[in-house]
């Protein structure tokens, strides 16, 4: 298989972050098919989820209360996998 012509390689696919700050304008939330649900009764406030989220979209609302911003959460599940208190459950996005 040969490499695509240079002009084609230079054209980024839709959704690619091409300049600093553009990720704020590209709402990545609709990409996801899963969403995290936070059980505030189980949460210990360790802050692991907020730290590990690759989108930086987990908001710390109050002590032991977190939520994901649906405009940017891509549903990757890293927060749920990393939560030591098993306080985050991934579930399907309802359309
Ligand atoms: S990782 Fe889990 S226990 Fe820690 S702050 Fe987030 S939801 Fe709470
Ligand atoms: S599912 Fe992924 S993108 Fe969404 S809040 Fe958790 S770590 Fe962040």
Image (cartoon, rainbow, N blue to C red):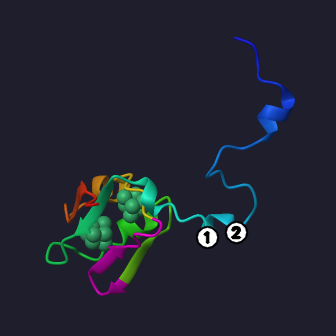
Image quadrant in which the N terminus is located: top right
Residue 5 falls in which quadrant of the image?
Answer: top right
Single out the residue that lies furthest toward the top. Answer: 1
Q: Residue at x 79, y 33 (%)?
A: 8
Ligand 2: which quarter?
Answer: bottom left
Q: Residue 77 magenta-drawn?
A: no
Single out the residue that lies furthest toward the bottom. Answer: 62
Q: Residue at x 63, y 49 (%)?
A: 14
**Residue 93 at x, y = what percent?**
28, 59
Q: Of the numbered discs in the image, which one, if any, rests on residue 24?
A: 1
Residue 7 falls in which quadrant of the image?
Answer: top right
| Residue count near mark 2 (Cα–Cα under 10 Å), binned few <14, some 14–19, many ≥20 | few
**Is 3 above or below relative to 53?**
above
Residue 20 falls in which quadrant of the image?
Answer: bottom right
**Is 94 above or below relative to 41?**
above
Q: Residue at x 81, y 39 (%)?
A: 10
**Circles 2 and 1: CB distance less than 8 Å?**
yes
| Residue count near mark 1 (Cα–Cα under 10 Å), binned few <14, some 14–19, many ≥20 | few
């Amino acid at each position: 298989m040969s490499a695509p012509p240079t002009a084609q390689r230079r054209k980024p696919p839709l959704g690619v972050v091409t300049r600093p700050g553009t990720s704020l304008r590209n709402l990545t939330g609709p990409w996801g098919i899963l969403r995290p649900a936070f059980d505030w009764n189980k949460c210990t406030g360790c802050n692991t989820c907020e730290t590990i989220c690759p989108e930086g979209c987990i908001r710390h609302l109050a002590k032991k209360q977190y939520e994901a911003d649906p405009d940017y959460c891509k549903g990757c599940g890293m927060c749920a996998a990393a939560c030591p208190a098993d306080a985050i459950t991934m579930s399907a996005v309802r359309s």
